[in-house]
Image: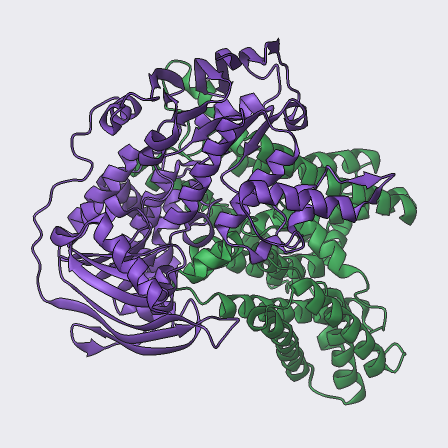
């Protein structure tokens, strides 16, 4: 095998921070090279250096690609050489067609006039390569996230890619789509295309990666050979966090009390297609001190269920009953749901959870401004006390509570969201994908907060696509598929296989 | 300004050379707030020199205040609108329409001017509420709704006035804009009441400033370096004392100034210290997250526009009283001056950012330039070009600062 990429002694500093500290990275031709590390370890920065987002001169060190030293001045430069990066946030124009997106900036044209025939036929060929059967004229917005991801990859292929960089490609995909994506990577490998895969999902990495480089605090701490031999997840985690995590979940002894929260025959319809039931006659309950999980694939209707319960924030034609402590409550607006004691922490913290450009201290009390005000006058000293209190209690890492949340890492942003809802004083807390996109160390801390909340007698609902997480933190699991609850089991009796088979069997029924 | 300190982020901990490092970091973080104040001072100093001292003469200061009062009154409402992530293009037309309405009611129907004034304010609030209804509850872009409003009310004021100018107003109504605080002490050539009022304002400002500073100190969070705190307060106090003295030797405080100062204080308090202020900033910062925090975002936007309408109506009354006549052309293009003032004052088009004090300073920057250039006899053509460039530079400065941070 020959080396396709060699990065030597890459150092990149931002004012006051050393983001990368003489990092070396070597990628062989036709291998899948996984890059892992906690958030803020420098993975994205390294990839931005490689793809020319940070141009030559703004960093120290040497990049050699296919035997030549490269000095990229921008992303167009690196793409010309065949280095293509696919970001976590997809860079597609939703209202344009697949074909238009694939050839955006690279149009098949004669003298400025687009050759649609060639555009479509080449798009069809590219889509076949990534296993998509859509028409090239389908608008991207009409595709699911998994298929959008494949369109991005097809776009990369259209540029004769030699090295494909994928930043957290599966973080928003369900298991089937993730599987398909990983299979595709293996096919590319067979075709001689190298890839760099950034991911938090260690099980995926151990499935496909040939080599694993672990970054920590801006330095490459180890390079592990994953081909054939067995690198254990524990080894990777130890290198990532610099300590060994014997337990990925904090221990807890559940003390389960009376039923607090009870939902019966809850139904909600799609806001645009009012005839489609997205949540279909769902009933469940949660007891004090209990952590209940809702398992299911992406699109099963779990987020929609939670948001429709939380002040009818999703859906139309909602029917059903919600009881708190056996008494019927009104949850028809967010305000009413909160006063009934129900809070919902979103899966998408940047869009639905935080005012990103505002400070930590001003984000935390947003759902309960009365808690820091006398009448309508905000008491800023009380606000500061509250912020400092939560910073301490749930360990929000920041230079000051006056820091803007946009500058925090994902894990710390998630903690600010949690602090906001804790301050609102809920009895029932619904957590939607509470650890999405955050690193192993921070995940453990989030789990510890969940355990602590349960211990204090709150009823917790956890929605998660990561089954090990559900198995690790919950007491009881409901399984949801296509809008319906298709199973329920105590976590002690649950397994990934059992949950999957419930989902698959229920899917066959229709 | 006195409430400012608690918003200051913690600066570098004093250590070796801590004081210097602290002020360095402080300047960098608060470039915008001090920058705009500095810009106003520089612009005023410049015109003071090139106009041979005419700019700060008592009579011209009085003029400056009267000329800009309606822009400032509307800028207060516009700041809230822009912070909430919207825009209101209709305010110039609403100002003209309300002025026309006042003229018809007072001059042609002989209505009592106080009653007419109250009706006008209600009509303004109503106009804002109707526009706000479409924007907040129907999610129609504010640009479009208020563009429509701009055309509608321009047309309606022509219709109400039947294309004519209507005036003059009775003496009592004119006093809104051209009256001064009464000279209760009867000292010839010096309005002692105004002077005392000015000094009282300075005293109150210093009292709250110091109190807030001591409280911040007590709760051990760093605030602005002493040099900045005292420097800023000294400049501000000196400016107020000078203006007060100058105005007192002329005819005293114009009534409009008193109204304006009260409004500035009230809106400043609302934006920085109340829960409703918090919510407006949150809506502009992230509407979806704010709604999911249990805040009624629709009602908030609706109220913001109703408030804007009412302030536009108040400005319309002031403007009509000042001209002593209502003309179909009144208010033409005023919305642009108001919006420019708010953006020069540091607000962001995306919403969630901006301060009342900034908007007021922004309005004064525009006003001083208008006034200074007119004294110098610079043609309206050049004036427009220069004002446009100042707006552009101010926003470029903002973006540059933001990118660097």
Q: For residue B168, say whether it is visible.
A: no
Place of residue A183 in the rendered image (x, y in percent of width and height, measured from the top left): 44, 38
Q: Position of residue A368 (x, y in %)?
A: 33, 59
Q: Is residue B398 visible?
A: yes
Task: Give the camera-side residue of B105 and B233.
Answer: B105
User: In which quadrant is the C terminus of chain B drawn?
Assistant: top right
x and y, in percent, of residue B37 in the image: 62, 39
Q: How is the image coloured?
A: by chain
The residue nearer to you, when weighing B283 against B269, is B283
Residue A23 occupies which quadrant of the picture? top left
User: Does B166 sit left or right of A320 as displayed?
Assistant: right
Rendered hue of chain A is purple
Residue drawn at the location 59% of the way across and 37% of the way down: B32
Q: Is residue A285 left or right of residue B127?
A: left
Where B43 falls versus A427 (above or below)?
Answer: above
Instruction: Check the image and report above or below for B248 versus B300.
Output: above
Residue A77, position in %: x, y? Answer: 67, 23
Above or below A261: residue A147 = above
- Label count reads 0
Q: Residue at x 75, y 84 (%)?
A: B106
Residue drawn at x 77%, y 51% as measured from the top left: B59
Color used for chain B? green
Residue drawn at (59%, 9%) of the image: A67
Decide if residue B116 is on the left or right side of residue B404. right
């Amino acid at each position: 095998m020959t080396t396709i990429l060699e990065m030597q002694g890459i150092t990149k500093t931002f004012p006051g921070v050393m983001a990368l500290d003489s990092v070396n990275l070597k990628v062989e031709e036709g291998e899948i090279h996984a890059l892992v590390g906690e958030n803020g370890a420098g993975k994205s920065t390294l990839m931005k250096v490689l793809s020319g987002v940070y141009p030559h001169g703004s960093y120290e060190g040497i990049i050699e690609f296919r035997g030549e030293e490269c000095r990229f001045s921008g992303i167009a430069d690196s793409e010309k050489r065949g280095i293509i990066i696919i970001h976590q946030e997809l860079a597609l124009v939703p209202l344009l067609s697949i074909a238009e997106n694939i050839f955006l900036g690279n149009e098949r044209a004669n003298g400025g006039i687009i050759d649609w025939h060639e555009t479509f036929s080449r798009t069809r060929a590219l889509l076949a390569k990534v296993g998509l059967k859509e028409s090239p004229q389908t608008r991207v917005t009409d595709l699911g996230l998994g298929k959008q991801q494949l369109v991005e990859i097809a776009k990369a292929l259209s540029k004769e890619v030699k090295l494909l960089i994928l930043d957290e490609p599966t973080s928003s995909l369900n298991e089937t789509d993730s599987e398909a994506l990983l299979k595709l990577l293996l096919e590319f490998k067979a075709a001689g295309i190298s890839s760099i895969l950034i991911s938090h999902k260690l099980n995926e990495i151990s499935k496909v990666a040939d080599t694993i480089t672990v970054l920590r605090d801006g330095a490459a701490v180890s390079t592990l050979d994953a081909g054939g031999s067995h690198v254990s997840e524990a080894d990777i985690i130890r290198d990532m966090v610099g300590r060994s995590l014997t337990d990925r979940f904090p221990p807890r002894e559940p003390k389960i009390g009376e039923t607090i929260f009870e939902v019966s025959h809850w139904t909600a319809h799609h806001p645009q297609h009012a005839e489609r039931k997205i949540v279909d006659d769902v009933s469940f309950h949660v007891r004090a001190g209990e952590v209940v999980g809702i398992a299911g694939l992406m699109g099963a209707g779990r987020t929609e269920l939670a948001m429709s319960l939380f002040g009818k924030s999703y859906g139309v034609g909602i029917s059903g009953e919600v009881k708190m402590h056996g008494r019927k409550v009104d949850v028809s607006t967010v305000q009413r749901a909160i006063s009934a004691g129900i809070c919902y922490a979103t899966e998408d913290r940047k869009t639905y959870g935080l005012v990103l450009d505002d400070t930590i201290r001003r984000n935390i009390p947003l759902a309960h401004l009365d808690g820091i005000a006398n009448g309508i006058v905000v008491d800023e000293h009380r606000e500061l006390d509250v912020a400092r209190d939560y910073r301490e209690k749930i360990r929000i890492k920041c230079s000051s509570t006056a820091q803007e949340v946009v500058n925090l890492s994902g894990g710390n942003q998630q903690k600010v969201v949690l602090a906001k809802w804790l301050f609102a004083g809920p009895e029932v807390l619904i957590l939607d994908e509470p650890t999405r996109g955050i690193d192993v160390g921070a995940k453990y801390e989030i789990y510890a907060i969940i355990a602590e909340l349960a211990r204090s007698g709150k009823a917790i609902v956890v929605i998660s696509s990561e089954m090990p997480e559900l198995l690790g933190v919950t007491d009881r699991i409901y399984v949801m598929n296509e809008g319906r609850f298709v199973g329920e089991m105590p976590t002690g009796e649950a397994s990934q296989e059992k949950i999957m088979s419930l989902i698959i069997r229920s899917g066959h029924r229709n | 300004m006195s409430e400012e300190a608690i918003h200051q982020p913690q600066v570098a901990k004093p250590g070796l050379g801590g004081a210097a490092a602290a002020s360095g970091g402080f300047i960098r973080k608060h470039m915008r707030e001090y920058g705009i104040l500095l810009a106003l001072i520089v612009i005023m100093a410049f015109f003071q020199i090139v106009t041979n001292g005419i700019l700060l003469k008592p009579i011209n200061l009085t003029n400056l205040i009267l000329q800009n009062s309606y822009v400032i009154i509307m800028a207060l409402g516009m700041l809230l609108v822009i912070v909430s992530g919207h825009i209101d293009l209709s305010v110039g037309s609403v100002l003209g329409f309300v002025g026309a309405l006042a003229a018809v009611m007072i001059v042609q129907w002989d209505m009592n001017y106080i009653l007419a004034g109250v009706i006008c304010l209600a009509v303004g609030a109503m106009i804002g509420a109707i526009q706000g209804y479409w924007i907040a509850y129907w999610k129609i872009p504010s640009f479009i709704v208020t563009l429509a409003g701009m055309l509608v009310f321009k047309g309606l004021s022509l219709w109400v006035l039947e294309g004519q100018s209507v005036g003059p107003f009775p003496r009592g109504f004119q006093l809104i804009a051209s009256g001064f605080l009464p000279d209760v002490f009867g000292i010839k050539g010096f309005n002692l009441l105004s002077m005392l009022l000015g000094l009282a304002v300075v005293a109150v400002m210093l009292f709250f400033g110091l109190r807030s500073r001591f409280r911040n100190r007590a709760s051990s969070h760093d605030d602005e370096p002493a040099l900045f705190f005292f420097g800023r307060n000294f400049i501000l106090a000196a400016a107020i004392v000078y203006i007060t003295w100058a105005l007192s030797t002329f005819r005293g405080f114009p009534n409009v100034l008193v109204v304006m100062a009260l409004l500035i204080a009230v809106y400043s308090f609302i934006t920085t210290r109340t829960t409703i202020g918090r919510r407006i900033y949150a809506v502009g910062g992230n509407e979806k997250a704010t709604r999911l925090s249990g805040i009624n975002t629709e009602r908030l936007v609706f109220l913001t526009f109703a408030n804007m309408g009412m302030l536009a109506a108040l400005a319309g009354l002031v403007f009509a009283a000042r001209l002593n006549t209502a003309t179909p052309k009144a208010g033409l293009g005023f919305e642009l001056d108001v919006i420019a003032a708010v953006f020069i004052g540091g607000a962001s088009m995306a919403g969630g950012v901006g301060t009342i004090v900034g908007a007021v300073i922004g309005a004064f920057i525009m006003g001083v330039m208008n006034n200074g250039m007119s004294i110098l006899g610079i043609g309206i053509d050049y004036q427009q070009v220069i004002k446009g460039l100042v707006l552009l530079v101010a926003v470029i400065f903002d973006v540059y600062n933001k990118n660097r941070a």
